[in-house]
Amino acid sequence: MTTRRYAQFRHALHGDRPLVLDGATGTVALGRGLAEDRNVAALNLVDAEAVTAIHRAYIDAGADIISTNTFCADRLSQSRYGLEDKVTALNEAGVRLAVAAAAKAGREVFVAGTIGPAFGASREDVEDAMAEQAEALVRGGADLLLVETVMAADVLDATLCAISRVRRERGCDIPVVVSMYVDCRTGRLADGHSPQDILDVVRDFEPEAVGFNCGDDPEALLSVALRFAEVSPYPLVVYPSAGLPDSHGCYGVTPSLFADAFARFLAQCRPGIIGGCCGTTPAHIAALAEKL
């Protein structure tokens, strides 16, 4: 079945302007002195108010899509903290907090259930972990799934197979957006694959949008995205980081510089989704939204 929210997101993605995605959750939370063990996903259960405040700040800044605080809320990542048995609770709480914040926005705001990369595990373990997370995000009520910071083709393939399994079992067709992390100097993923190679991986799955996030420099990543848009058949998603952190953990790309980089990019390209990654704040998203 297709839910009303899935259809609304697909319609909005092809609207007359790009959808604005929120910015970073992890670096904002850490910057506020939260999650001393750096397990930001655990805040969904231990400090719901803090997570809700971040969602509300991005909504107030103009975000059309807010991301659940679930980037590392999979079994493989949470095993580092001894919380692998809390995966379902972490993800369901993450969706619940985002949905509640979106419901109070006074306008249409979509909730993206975020799924980050997996490392150091067999394909079977990756697929099972991602299926567990995707199931919880879908059941919790996410409007779409955002598979982000993709660094390896085989991990992406396992993740998409996991989501396909959940779709079949639940009888739903939740929209999926895929976002890659590339080295802007080489234009390739960590495993050596090119973004064009990833188009072959996702072809049979048919995601709603494909693109990039993170990166060392917004200008560089937007240049990579511009070249990719020329060959990709999918709407483009792109949300750079605010540069790299210095020795004090501060990011150098200001909201105005971030938005100006996007303004030049938008003069050449019509993406489907734009936003921010590491180091970006509600101020970055507000400055970006003003450019539309």
Image: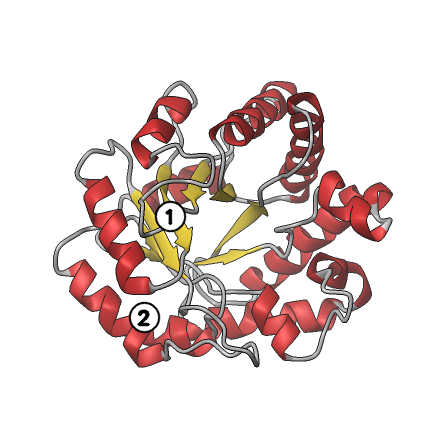
Neighbour class for label 1 at 10 Å: few (<14), some, many (≥20)? many
- Gap between marks 1 and 2, in whole Å? 17 Å
Q: Position of residue 63 (x, y in %)?
A: 42, 64
Which is more foreground, mark 1 or mark 2? 1
Does 267 sit left or right of 114 as displayed? left
* Quadrant assignment, res 75: top right
Residue drawn where x is 61% and y is 51% of the image: 71
Disc 1 residue type? Phe
Disc 2 residue type? Leu
Q: Position of residue 59 (x, y in %)?
A: 48, 69
Residue drawn where x is 31% and y is 55% of the image: 221
Relative to 197, is 65 above or below? Answer: below
Does 250 sit left or right of 194 as displayed? right
> If you read the primary sequence from the N terminus, does the residue marked by circle 1 or circle 2 appear first?
1
Residue denoted by label 1: 212
Give the camera-side residue of 242 and 160: 242
Q: Is residue 124 visible to the viewer in this orientation of the structure?
A: yes
Q: Is residue 291 visible to the viewer in this orientation of the structure?
A: no
Relative to 164, is 180 above or below? Answer: below
Q: Position of residue 208 (x, y in %)?
A: 37, 35
Give the camera-side residue of 66 and 218: 218
Q: Find residue 288 and name its label.
A: 2
Residue drawn where x is 45% and y is 68% of the image: 244
The local secondary structure at tag 1 comes to strand
